[in-house]
Structures are given as structure tokens and as C-alpha cells.
Image (spheres, grey):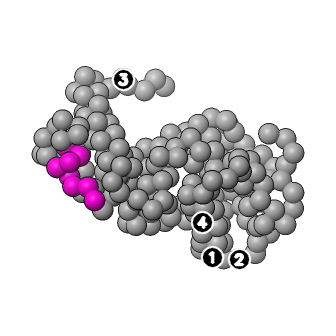
Amino acid sequence: MNEEQPCRHQRRRERTRKQLQDAMLGLVLEKGFDSIAIQEITDRADLGRGTFYFHFDCKEDALWSIVEDRIRLTEREVAEDFEGKLPEQAEYYGYRNIFQHIALNKDIYQVIVGSKGSQEVANRAKQYMVDETIRDMENFGLYQEIGQPPEITAQIVVGILISLAYWWIETTNDYSAQNLAAIVYRTLHHQDPPTTP
């Protein structure tokens, strides 16, 4: 089934939303989340304050929309790559996909887990990852060998990933997404990751 093409009005709304998101992200990276005001966002986007509130409830909502849009895009790309079939040692590929996503969206992750970001948005991202991990455990039987309740396992896995992402973004280092995924996999699963890409 073909998806309907968005009408001109929908395209204009999406462009306006994107203008606000781009202005928000630029300001957060320059000044830090707590230092910016909604008026600065609308000034940079060259839009009215009412337009901001048409799209978002608050600054946190606007920032989360950027994060969520990029997460959804990556999820669609990953789903297309695996075509519904999980590979052996699927957890490793999950870690690799997360670190590759971070590498491609470093600006966003500086805002999520870096020092200039919003704690509220960081908490939302963490909870999103925990919920997704629990869902994957229930739907695909991941992390069975860890032998802990899903809510505990999800907190452990996400905590490790977020801490390592923060370190990776905030320090100078030569680790690749594959390196970090392999390290996490060995740490949590006590076996070597797959040798194939």
C-alpha cells in the first residue's frame, strides 16, 4: 500500500517544525539548554512565539522532539536492514547500532548525555531506552543468559550504555562504535562478539 503524500499544508508545518528544532539545537550547543529562552529560539528561526507553542508545549518538549525523530529514523533503518529476522548474538548488533547512531548524531547526544543538555530530556531518553529494552526482551527473548528480572536487566544495560556514551562523547579517544559494542558485549555476555559485520 502506498502512503499518502503529505499535502502542501502538512509540508509547510513540517518545515516550520524543523526550523524551530534546528534553532533549538544550535542554541543548546552554543549556550547550553538552561541558558536559552523560547524567544531566542523563535528569533533564530524567524518565527513568532505563538508558532512555537503550536508545535511544542515547552523547551523540553521541543528538544525531546529532535531526539525522538532521530531515534525513530534509526529504528526504521535498522528494521529494514534485518527484515524482521534477528541475527545470532543480536544484542551485540543492538549495541553497535546504538553507538553508530550516537556517532552519526553526536550533536544530539551532546545535548542528551553531555554537559550542555537537559536533565529532563536525558531522563526521558533513558526511560525510552529502558522501555524498548524490556519490550525486546519480551518479544525476542534477549538477555536470557543474564537471568535477572527484565526491569533490572534493562536498567543495567541502559545504565552502562549511557555512561559509556557520555564518556565517549566528552573525552578524546579512538574507540569506534564497533569497539565499544564489542566491549559491552564481552562485559555483559561473557563471550566474544560475532566476527562478521
**Can the viewer see residue 119?**
yes
Q: Are marks 3 and 4 in contact (CB under 8 Å)?
A: no
The numbered disc on residue 148 is 2
The picture places residue 156, in percent across and down from the top left corner, at: 64, 72
The numbered disc on residue 152 is 1
Predominant secondary structure, magenta span:
helix
Based on the picture, tell me whether residue 134 belongs to the magenta stretch: no
Which label lies toward us, 4 or 2? 4
The picture places residue 146, in percent across and down from the top left corner, at: 76, 72
Amino acid type at image mark 4? Ser
Amino acid type at image mark 2? Gln
Magenta span covers which residues?
35-42
Mark 3 / mark 4, whichever is N-terminal: 3
Residue position marked by numbered label 4 in the rendering: 163
Q: Residue 154 versus residue 107: which sits nearer the camera?
A: 107
Amino acid type at image mark 3? Gln
In the shown orientation, is residue 196 left or right of residue 94?
right
Q: Are marks 2 and 1 in contact (CB under 8 Å)?
A: yes
The numbered disc on residue 5 is 3
- The residues tagged by marks 4 and 2 sit, at their Cα atoms, a distance apart of 21 Å
- The quarter of the image holding the C terminus is top right
